[in-house]
Image (cartoon, grey):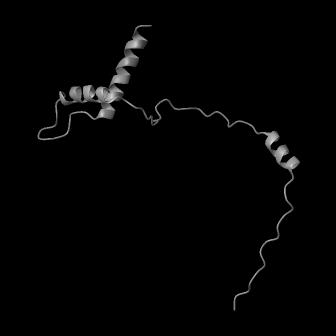
Amino acid sequence: MNKLSLPPQRSKPTSEAEIEAIINKGGSPAPKQDVNPETIRHVNTRLTEGLIRQIDALRASRPRKMGSPKMGISLRDWIVEAVVEKLERETAAK
């Protein structure tokens, strides 16, 4: 036969003063961690349909693998290449 137990006893209600004390206590910020510049981060972006069409036209002109219906470079890889080229141009100009 299973023994039934009573529900846990309720603690006294928390007063507004106790709640305010906890809120005002605050905390310390998280410690800064060394960030590896090679760590991959995900970024979401929005591009217009016109820009995507222009990029797709350039992607379509890239060589494809023999017999492959896929474009020679993915949209993501094309955008990463463009960003790297832009960074190289702008850092070289300084």
Left or right: 52 as drawn, with respect to 12: left
Which quadrant holds residue 61?
A: top left
- In the picture, the quarter occupied by the C terminus is top left
Residue in the picture at 76% in, 80% down? 5
What percent of the width, then of the height, locates residue 73? 25, 33
Q: Nearer the viewer, residue 94 or 56?
A: 56
Furthest toward the bottom, the residue is 1
What percent of the width, then of the height, locates residue 35? 55, 32
Furthest toward the top, the residue is 94
Q: Nearer the viewer, residue 79 or 35?
A: 79
Left or right: 71 as drawn, with respect to 94: left
Left or right: 14 as drawn, with respect to 78: right
What percent of the width, then of the height, locates residue 33? 61, 34
Residue in the picture at 40% in, 10% down? 92
Left or right: 80 as drawn, with respect to 38: left
Which quadrant holds residue 57?
A: top left
Q: Is residue 28 above or below residue 17?
A: above
